[in-house]
Amino acid sequence: MPNNQLKRLAHGAMMIALFTVLVAIAFYVPFINLIATLFAPLPIAWYSAKFDRSSSILVAILGCIIPFFFGGLLIIPFALIFASLGVVMGDSLRLKKSKVFLLMSSGITLLITFAVQYIISLKLFETDFIKESMQLMRDSYKKSFELSQSLTGQTPMDETALNLLFDTMEMTLPASITIAVFFFTFLIISINLPMLKRLGVNVPKFNAFKNLRLPKSILWYYLILLSVNLFISPETGTPLYVICLNLSMVLWLLLTLQGISFIHFCLDAYGSPSILKVLATIIAIPLYSFVVLIGIFDLGFDIRSFVKGKIQR
């Protein structure tokens, strides 16, 4: 027992030190900070996968406190994001959860952490960094359009269209942030799981992308959303309009992924080279409306069995 406690303490101290170094590099050092950001949750994730939850939370808390002595208050929210992500990742691995559970739990943790930090920034420091970022982007676009007009005599977009664009962007911020957070989480997981495997942690695997099957309930959500837009037609700017707009973005993305997955399935069934899958994925982006229809048919009907049977003949 004393040996186990000593081992826990020794590994905890090492992981806190390594986590502090990675967070400091990610916060201060240009260029290298991108690499350090991707690997920042690794020490806490490894410790959490090896030891119990209470010890992992304690190590994560200390990992957030120690960087304060190097970077002050500004570095604590930065460290908190990766510490919480590391604990959830490692705990999911320790409990031998699936990779889908790992992705969902890690993504939700990042969303909650981001939301808490945003509320604290808004209430305590009276700083709305999202609103300020949008205003900065709006001013930047206006200046670039003014410069373009002074050089060419023409403007790429009138002020009404520009305001409409930014109003739409502001209304879709919840969906945009959610999608960005889950994409970032997927990237972190994809990079760190092979490293954790090398360090002796059992890690789960995703099924092949061609076998992706989203829940059929997504079709019902999409049908309800279409019905609301068709029969109620919420006015622009109303809460119902914002909700429908954000849900539409998320559902379009999911159905597009389902459609691309079906295309990969067909290409793989015909024994097509991998380069065709890459080209099909690139072409699917501008043709997402058509790909969404493919995704709907793939979820609603068993067309994969039809394609498989057709090929086997």
Image (cartoon, grey):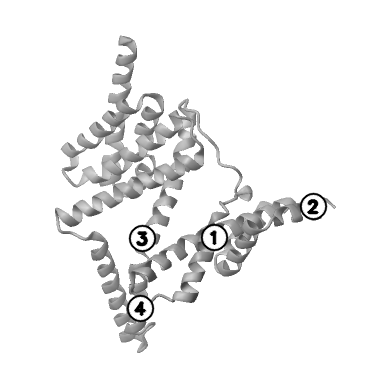
Q: Which mark is residue 309?
A: 2
Residue 163: x and y in percent read: 32, 78
- Mark 3: which amino acid? Pro
| Amino acid tagged 4 | Leu
Image mark for residue 180: none
Does residue 267 appear anywhere in the picture?
Answer: no
- Which marked residue is nearer to the observer: mark 1 or mark 3? 1
Q: Looking at this view, is 22 or 202 the one in front?
A: 202
The residue labelled by disc 1 is: 220
SS at badge 4: helix
Look at the numbered disc 3 and give the secondary structure of its residue. helix
Q: Which residue is mark 4?
A: 164
Look at 40% across and 32% down and name the residue there: 91
Q: Nearer the viewer, mark 2 or mark 1?
A: 1
Q: Position of residue 58 (x, y in %)?
A: 26, 29
Q: Specify the label residue 174 is tagged with.
A: 3
Check disc 2 and give the amino acid type.
Gly
Seen at 29% across and 82% down, the residue is: 146
Q: How far is the residue under mark 1 from the one under mark 3?
A: 21 Å
**Mark 2 residue crowding within 10 angstroms, few (<14) / some (14–19) / many (20+):** few
Q: Secondary structure at mark 1?
A: helix
Q: Nearer the viewer, mark 4 or mark 3?
A: 3
Quarter in which the N terminus is drawn? top left
Q: Is residue 266 left or right of residue 30?
A: right
Question: Callout 4: few (<14), some (14-19), or many (20+) C-alpha neighbours within 10 Å?
Answer: few
